[in-house]
Image (spheres, rainbow, N blue to C red):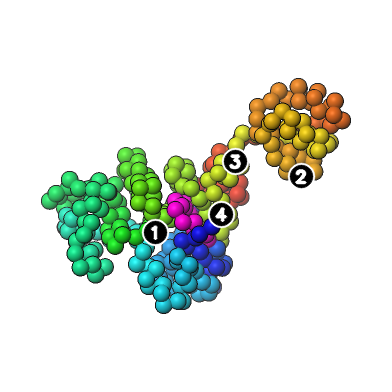
């Protein structure tokens, strides 16, 4: 797997307090990676480290495989665009003038692609309207447009939907999907809105107290949340044979437990298994929402 961003046991301390604690993250190329954590979990700090706004106390990271201590990291950073906390927008200027300013900051010799970027983020028709008259969603999209100057292929968005109304959230969601699908941009998004991120994320990293609790891809997460019957049986081998014969979807959990993902009549199953010298000792139907999976993973809590 090719990773655009990897950290190796990175740590950021403020005196004795560890804001980032031996954290490892792996952002695959082409992913929309959702960095999920409660308020204060360390999401912004991690992003600030990656963007070189702060230095790690220890540990290292790579961007496009280039280590942060390597001189070539400056070149790698040019391929990144980021919005950290609130986008830096000049409110007295139009969308176009805001973008032009960014072209100058980045040192680009011409305004190539400027209209294309405005079109991409849906601000092409804003004309002479100053950014101060934009809705929050439009401001956020302008922030993303600014981050897109220089044609990055890795975009970092810190809490991009914070404070947005439902319409604004949909616009940002669709824009992120478009950038990912049409432009092939890898996106790292931090958020505490798991439900919202689940509509677009391909990969997740769950962080708490500066530590990576789990990294998981969308497919595996969906598998874990799938409706299932958890069975405790006396003879897992026979149970497996039966499920294979019936072409049922299952997962062996231990030498006693097996999960069944297909609908089945439990009485019929018990009769069929008893003929094979296998007794069902216990069974429980389970279905987990993404939210409850997260809460269980984090050991309960607020602000999810
Ligand atoms: P939020 O969703 O609220 O933005 P977050 O996950 O982005 O939260 P961070 O802003 O990264 O969290 O903060 C992580 C922890 O580090 C918090 O406990 C915060 O108080 C602490 N922290 C951040 N910056 C500093 C600093 N400059 N000095 C001391 N502590 C800090």
Label 4, label 1: how many angstroms apart (C-alpha)?
A: 19 Å
Label 2, label 4: how many angstroms apart (C-alpha)?
A: 23 Å
Give the mark, 1 or 2, whose residue is nearer the N terminus: 1
Give the structural element (helix, strand or loop) at label 2. loop
Label 1 close to label 2 by CB (< 8 Å): no
Residue 79, placed above or below residue 225: below
Label 3 close to label 2 by CB (< 8 Å): no
Give the mark, 4 or 1, whose residue is nearer the N terminus: 1
Give the mark, 3 or 2, whose residue is nearer the N terminus: 3
Label 3, label 2: how many angstroms apart (C-alpha)?
A: 17 Å
Give the mark, 2 or 4, whose residue is nearer the N terminus: 4
Q: In this figure, which residue is indicated by the disc labeled 4? A: 215
1 or 2: mark nearer the eye: 1
Please indicate, yes or no, whether residue 292 appears anywhere in the rendered image. Answer: no
Image coordinates for residue 229, horizontal then vertical, percent: 69, 33
Label 4, label 3: how many angstroms apart (C-alpha)?
A: 14 Å
Label 1, label 3: how many angstroms apart (C-alpha)?
A: 28 Å
| Residue stretch rendered in magenta on the structure | 25-35
Give the structural element (helix, strand or loop) at label 3. helix
| Residues packed near mark 3 inside 10 Å, few (<14), some (14 to 19) or many (20 plus) | few
| Residues packed near mark 1 inside 10 Å, few (<14), some (14 to 19) or many (20 plus) | many
Give the mark, 4 or 3, whose residue is nearer the N terminus: 4
Label 4 close to label 3 by CB (< 8 Å): no
Q: In this figure, which residue is indicated by the disc labeled 2? A: 254
Identity of the residue drawn at 46% across and 56% down: 29
Image coordinates for residue 258, horizontal then vertical, percent: 73, 38
Label 4 close to label 1 by CB (< 8 Å): no
Q: Report the side of 285 relative to 235 (left or right).
A: left
Identity of the residue drawn at 76% across and 22% down: 268
Identity of the residue drawn at 53% across and 42% down: 291
């Amino acid at each position: 797997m090719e990773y655009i961003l990897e950290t190796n046991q990175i740590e950021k301390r403020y005196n004795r307090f560890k804001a980032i604690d031996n954290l490892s993250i792996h952002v695959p190329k082409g992913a929309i990676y959702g960095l999920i954590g409660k308020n204060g979990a360390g999401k912004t700090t991690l992003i600030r480290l990656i963007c070189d706004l702060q230095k790690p106390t220890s540990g290292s990271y790579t961007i496009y495989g280039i280590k942060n201590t390597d001189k070539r990291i400056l070149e790698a950073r040019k391929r990144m665009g980021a919005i950290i906390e609130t986008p830096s927008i000049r409110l007295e200027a139009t969308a176009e003038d805001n973008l032009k300013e960014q072209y100058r900051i980045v040192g680009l010799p011409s305004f190539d692609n400027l209209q294309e970027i405005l079109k991409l983020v849906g601000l092409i028709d804003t004309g002479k309207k100053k950014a101060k008259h934009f809705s929050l969603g439009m401001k956020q999209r302008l922030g993303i447009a600014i981050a897109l100057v220089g044609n990055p292929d890795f975009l970092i968005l810190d809490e991009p939907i914070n404070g947005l109304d439902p319409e604004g959230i949909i616009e940002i969601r669709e824009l992120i999907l478009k950038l990912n699908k049409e432009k092939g941009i890898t996106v790292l998004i931090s958020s505490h809105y798991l439900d919202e991120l689940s509509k677009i994320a391909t990969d997740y990293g769950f962080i708490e107290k500066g530590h990576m609790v789990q990294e998981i891809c969308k497919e595996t997460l969906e598998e874990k949340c799938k409706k299932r019957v958890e069975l405790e049986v006396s003879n897992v081998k026979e149970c497996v044979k039966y499920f294979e014969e019936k072409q049922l979807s299952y997962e062996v959990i231990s030498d006693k437990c097996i999960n069944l993902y297909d609908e089945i009549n439990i009485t019929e199953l018990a009769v069929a298994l008893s003929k094979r010298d296998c007794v069902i000792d216990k069974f429980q139907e389970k279905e987990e929402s993404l939210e409850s999976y997260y809460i269980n993973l984090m050991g309960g809590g607020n602000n999810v």
